[in-house]
Image: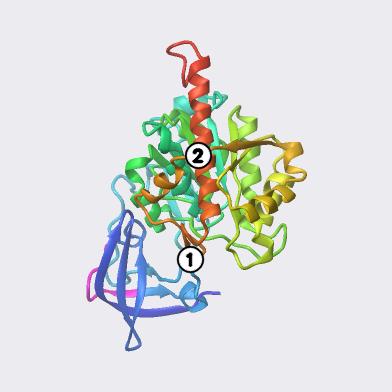
Amino acid sequence: MVRWRSGVVAEVRRRWRGAVELSVTVDGSVTRALAYPALVGEPEPGDRVLLNVNAQLMGLGTGGYALVVALPDRLPADPPGTGTDRMDGHVVKARYTPLQAIVRGVEEPSSPHHAAIAAAETLGGMPVVTADLHSALPAVVAGIHADHPDTRIAYVMTDGGALPAWFSRTLDGLRDRLAGTVTVGQAFGGDLESVTTHSGLLAARYALGADIAIVAQGPGNLGAGLPWAFSGVAVGEAVNATGVLGGRAVGALRISAADPRERHQGISHHSLTAYGRVALAPCDLPLPDGLTPGLAARVEAQLGDLSVRHRIVRVATEGLDAALRASPVPLSTMGRGLDADYGYFLTAAAAGRHAAQLVVEEDQQQPAGEHGAQ
């Protein structure tokens, strides 16, 4: 199940929040590797490293690194305040794997946010944008901030893709645009840790003070080409969690005219399944008015049951192109950039714009001083 290699660090290449990229010599060849210092320590040139090369040998587009499992000759010190008789937190993530990590969950009594989360019963109408792919995140953020740059956004990262939030260079580049990240389920490495999507949404609202939350899996998406066999099915469950907690779900449909696979043409079968069959609670499904005629016609023909269960919202797109092009991080999905898969990013940005408008409408309806009250 694991393809192991032993190598020596030749060069420390680049860093981003929580991760360091290395050149490692393995059997006389140099390979690209990734280490998470919080898990394995700080690699230095000359260090021997143990590697898991599964993703690299499989040629995965998202995660094609050899991953550092350990620095066996120079183990890191225990984290501060984590003696054998006491741990800062009690939530175990990546449970019962060799790299299981113990973190402090936002729900725990030792958390400074425990009281707020324990008392919270509703999201108070907070809009929650749900997306299938991690690549939608910067486009949704661009759409939110296009008209309302001061809107506070929290990212709730689910565990359908990468588990460490540190893997995402997108998150590192969006730090100035986000109030913070909550990693939920088995995912870890966010500004806050949470046990479930439900409590992660409450943490976004009451611990990070978000006006809007965005829920999506980390980088990578597991799919087997069948209607039910893809990790993005959790999008529908996020809609349900939002509904149960009294939030306002806004679905960012996965739309494309560029994907060569028929099942992802127009509205992807991922969205048709997640919103059409998994999501039992209603949500808003924004459609931008700037789609090409051919793509727009195909999307209209696919709406079907979606328009019965959910509310289709038409969104004007003036200014969204400029917002997308001003993104502080590159826009890319399945290797395609903004112009190569324009409809995908435009739809995600339209979802963000609609969510921001919901915040404005909610503020206008509430008496002064009540916004964000439980």
Q: Earlier in the sequence, mark 2 or mark 1?
A: 1
**Residue 113: quarter of image:** top left
Q: Is residue 313 left or right of residue 109?
A: right
Residue 193 can be seen, yes or no: no
Mark carried by residue 352: 2
Q: Which residues are magenta?
A: 42-49
Q: What predominant SS class does the magenta segment belong to?
A: loop
Q: Looking at the image, which is closer to me, 113 or 225?
A: 225
Q: Secondary structure at mark 2?
A: helix
Residue 216 can be seen, yes or no: yes
Q: How many marks?
A: 2
Asked if labels 1 and 2 touch by Cβ distance under 8 angstroms, the answer is no
Q: Is residue 261 magenta?
A: no
- Up the image or down, 280 lies above or below 52; here it is above
Mark carried by residue 160: none
The spot of residue 76 in percent (x, y) is 28, 61
